[in-house]
């Protein structure tokens, strides 16, 4: 058999990393020793042969590598490999490989794999690096030290002590003594209705001179603040410091799952973002607040170097912005006097989505409970100008498009906001659609949630199943495409002769934000954070599981690359931008980035098909 | 099961009636070893995907130019055991050269048909042949056997085109022009498109299609050989 007779197989090897670095002679040898296997989806998992371990190179189809606990370790598609961990470590196979799509797989026997590695250095490096990356992925799930990125479920008490609502407070006190806890959850028909703490027993029982047979319901704190088990530890701390409480029931789907206390959190160590937010909350003057805000870029750098997930970095940084905004509102209200009516401070765009990073500008507005008279108008004019100016001085520069609460256009009563949104939805002209992409990612940073809910509910009622508006939004978001050309080559932007690279924000993250937004609006999903939107879409079966997981991963990956790149730019005193040059990346990262863009591309096609076909 | 018994009895009668005629012991042995495969499932059976390139489509006039072989064992296709043989022919390759990319001078180090057929029997002994549009390949093989050994053999084979035709008809009710060609059939199973076109690549392509088909039919360990086998003589 002469070498070129297996040309299609050799060509495939030549065009996929890391085989592309092999000499033609080695490629030919490799092709000749391949065993082709077929893996139908119906058999669910790849069966491994423990006696003859081999490298699996996917020719077609899709696979998922999961560790024994079922945690996703890697996703493998055409041109990618699995099975190398076992070959490199010599340990027996523990991970399971699920077959997502029928697949044709090239098996490369261990002796050949070893020979290719010894003969070719870059080939060897590719796999050792991929192996290290995977270990790091596995390790990431175990990391608990970073308060900012660890979750409530890691430190909550899993068997909460609870009592029925009609028990006596003496029974409650005994229960607390016997279990040596400082609080109990109060349940009624399995539902959490309140919480009783040491402090309640002191302030509401002893100090008031009540008897021990008084019913728990009389003295408990009703409808307490709660937290979800997958919330960040850091978010729980924020809730505690905001409401001056020390106990937070952990509730998932209205079921009490546990309890987390300030002591639990203290034990898990405080860390920098919390200290920073604590400091923000303590500052008594705007000048001092500006001074404290100088630490924000340092915090970002620390988070990037700690390799936190991009989504979590966004949430942490946005929480800092939120805290800063709230503190500015409170301080300025101290100067201006109490507000004449209830109002919400609205955050739009990236702050709304909780994915702020470095060099963000302001996008905000004000929602008033009702129409402002002359006095109220003057009051809010002063307040908003002061807060926006404060934010600008803290590093959140004025919005170039003037979308700010200090602009009377974006300082409206509930009724006017409702009309404004209705107009955008009912007559989706280009300008309205451009606005929509900013304004529909909104969140109340300050003020009564009920007021904000009223606005959001009315907006959702207009957008849900509104085909014409959704087609407009979809069409608008399809004007940008990911930077992939034919044959999956990166398309680079140039500035004169200088190569700027790829714009990871406008040609990456923003496209995913757009896609998630259109779907969310179509389905009346209220989440604004892109990752949460995607999850909600998956849970509601609007996006299929595979597409949703892929899109969420692509979102995280692109955002991570952008942050890592900005971290690199900042530490090397380069101008911080959204542009990434692919030549700065390893072949593996390039490969993954290409895949992430491919996912965006596919999701755009899906969006086009679903929303724009009839117009 | 009926097919299995029928196949066995066909082979038994054949060897009885041929006991005088079939004088070549090797040929009898070749034929006998095949009957062991019928009751095996596809996963355990010894199979060999085959593709022939010919000078034309008429077994009486045209000749075999090359043979591609690749075994199918335990659900995988070992390329290390793939074989590609060129056969020297009378006259020129002519027009079909354009299709197969074989030019006359390549055929210079080819085997004559007599040696090629002996080689084929040796390579495929004990293995049931799998081909796309198998009756055509079988007709050429039978004709060549007849020319070389003066007799034909009763040969079992599996035809991936027939499997695909049955499946397609069941799903769509009627056939469309070209819908069960090798390339089109492979596309339905999301198998890759191979640019190259020679007997070996087509044999590999056929083997891959076969694995996909059997998986779709119910699984390699569930389907028995005799359920798919046809006979050629």
Image (tube, coloured by chain):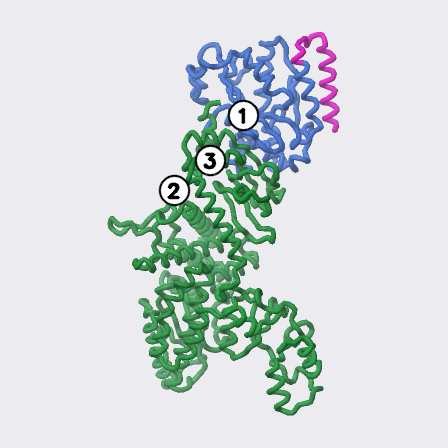
Query: Eyeballing the image, is A238 above or below A208?
Result: above
Query: Which stretch did the figure color magenta?
Result: B1-27
Location of mark 3 (residue): A116
- Chain painted blue: B
Dot 2 falls on a residue whose secondary structure is helix
Choose mark 1 or mark 2, whichever is in front.
Answer: 1
Dot 3 falls on a residue whose secondary structure is helix
Query: Eyeballing the image, is A366 above or below B42?
Result: below
Q: Nearer the viewer, residue A553 or A407?
A: A553
Identity of the residue drawn at 41% across and 71% down: A321
Location of mark 1 (residue): B82
Q: Earlier in the sequence, mark 3 or mark 2?
A: 3
Image disc number at residue A486: 2
Whether callout 1 and callout 2 share a subunit is answered no
Dot 1 falls on a residue whose secondary structure is loop
Identity of the residue drawn at 51% across and 62% down: A532
Image quadrant in which you'd find residue A207: bottom right
Letter of the chain that mark 2 sits on in the rendering: A
Image disc number at residue A341: none
Q: Residue furthest left?
A: A496
């Amino acid at each position: 058999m002469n070498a070129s007779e297996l040309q299609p197989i050799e060509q495939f090897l030549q065009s996929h990393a890391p085989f592309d670095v092999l000499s033609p002679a080695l490629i030919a040898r490799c092709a000749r020793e391949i065993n082709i296997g077929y893996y139908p989806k119906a058999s669910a998992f790849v069966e491994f042969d423990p006696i003859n371990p081999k490298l699996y190179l996917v020719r077609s189809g899709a696979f998922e590598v999961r560790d024994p606990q079922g945690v996703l370790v890697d996703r493998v598609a055409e041109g990618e490999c699995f099975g190398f961990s076992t070959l490199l470590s010599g340990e027996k196979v523990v991970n399971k490989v699920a077959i997502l799509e029928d697949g044709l797989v090239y098996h490369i026997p261990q002796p050949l794999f070893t020979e290719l590695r010894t003969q070719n250095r870059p080939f060897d490096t590719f796999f050792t690096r991929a192996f290290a990356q995977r270990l790091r992925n596995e390790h990431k799930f175990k990391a608990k030290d970073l308060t900012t990125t660890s979750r409530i479920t890691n430190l909550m008490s899993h068997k909460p002590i609870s009592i029925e609502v009609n028990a006596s407070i003496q029974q409650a006190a005994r229960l607390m003594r016997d279990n040596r806890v400082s609080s109990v959850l109060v349940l009624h028909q399995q539902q959490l209705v309140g919480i009783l703490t040491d402090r309640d027993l002191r302030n509401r029982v002893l100090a008031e001179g009540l008897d021990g047979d008084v019913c728990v319901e009389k003295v408990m704190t009703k409808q307490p603040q709660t937290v979800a088990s997958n919330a960040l530890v850091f978010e729980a701390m924020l809730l505690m410091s905001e409401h001056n409480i020390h106990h937070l029931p952990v509730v998932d789907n209205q079921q009490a799952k546990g309890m987390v206390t300030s002591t639990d959190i203290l034990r898990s160590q405080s860390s920098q973002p919390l200290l920073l937010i604590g400091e923000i909350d303590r500052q008594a003057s705007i000048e001092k607040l500006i001074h404290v805000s100088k630490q924000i870029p340092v915090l970002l750098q620390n988070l990037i170097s700690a390799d936190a997930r991009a989504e979590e970095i966004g949430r942490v940084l946005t929480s800092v912005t939120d805290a800063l905004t709230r503190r500015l509102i409170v301080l300025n209200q101290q100067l201006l006097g109490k507000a004449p009516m209830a109002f919400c401070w609205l955050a739009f765009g990236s702050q709304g989505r909780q994915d702020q990073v470095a060099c963000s500008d302001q996008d905000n507005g004000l929602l008033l409970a009702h129409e402002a008279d002359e006095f109220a108008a003057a009051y809010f004019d002063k307040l908003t100008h002061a807060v926006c100016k404060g934010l600008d001085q803290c590093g959140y520069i004025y919005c170039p498009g003037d979308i700010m609460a200090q602009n009377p256009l974006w300082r409206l009563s509930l009724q006017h906001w409702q009309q404004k949104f209705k107009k955008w939805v009912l007559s989706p002209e280009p300008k309205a659609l451009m606005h929509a992409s900013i304004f529909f990612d909104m969140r109340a940073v300050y003020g009564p949630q009920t007021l904000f809910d009223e606005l959001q509910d009315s907006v959702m009622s207009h957008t849900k199943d509104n085909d014409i508006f959704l087609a407009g939004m979809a069409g608008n978001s399809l004007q940008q495409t990911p930077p992939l050309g034919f044959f999956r080559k990166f398309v680079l932007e140039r500035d004169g002769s200088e190569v700027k690279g790829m714009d990871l924000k406008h040609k990456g993250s923003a496209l995913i934000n757009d896609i998630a937004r259109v779907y969310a609006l179509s389905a009346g999903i209220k989440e604004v954070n892109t990752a949460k939107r995607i999850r909600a879409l998956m849970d509601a079966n609007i996006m299929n599981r595979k597409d949703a997981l892929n899109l969420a991963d692509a979102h995280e990956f692109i955002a991570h690359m952008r942050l890592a790149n900005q971290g690199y730019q900042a530490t090397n005193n380069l101008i911080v931008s959204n542009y990434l040059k692919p030549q700065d990346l390893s072949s593996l990262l390039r490969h993954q980035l290409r895949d992430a863009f491919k996912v965006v591309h596919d999701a755009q096609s899906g969006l086009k098909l679903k929303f724009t076909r009839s117009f | 099961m009926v097919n299995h018994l029928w196949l066995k009895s066909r082979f038994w009668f054949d060897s009885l009636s041929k006991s005088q005629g079939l004088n070549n012991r090797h040929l009898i042995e070749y034929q006998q070893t095949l009957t062991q495969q019928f009751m095996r499932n596809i996963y355990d059976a010894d199979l060999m995907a085959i593709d022939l390139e010919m000078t034309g489509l008429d077994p009486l006039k045209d000749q075999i130019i090359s043979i591609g072989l690749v075994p199918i064992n335990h659900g995988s296709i070992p390329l290390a055991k793939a074989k590609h043989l060129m056969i020297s022919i009378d006259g020129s390759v002519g027009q079909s050269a354009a299709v197969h990319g074989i030019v006359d001078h390549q055929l210079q180090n080819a085997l004559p048909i007599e040696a090629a057929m002996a080689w084929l029997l040796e390579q495929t002994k004990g293995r049931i042949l799998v081909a796309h549009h198998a009756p055509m390949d079988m007709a050429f093989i039978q004709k060549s056997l007849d020319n070389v050994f003066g007799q034909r053999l009763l040969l079992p084979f599996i035809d991936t085109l027939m499997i695909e035709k049955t499946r397609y008809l069941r799903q769509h009710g009627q056939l469309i022009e070209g819908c069960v060609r090798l390339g089109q059939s492979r596309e339905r199973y999301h198998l890759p498109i191979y640019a190259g076109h020679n007997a070996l690549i087509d044999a590999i392509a056929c083997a891959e299609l076969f694995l996909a088909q059997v998986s779709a039919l119910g699984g390699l360990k569930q389907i028995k050989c005799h359920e798919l086998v046809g006979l050629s003589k």
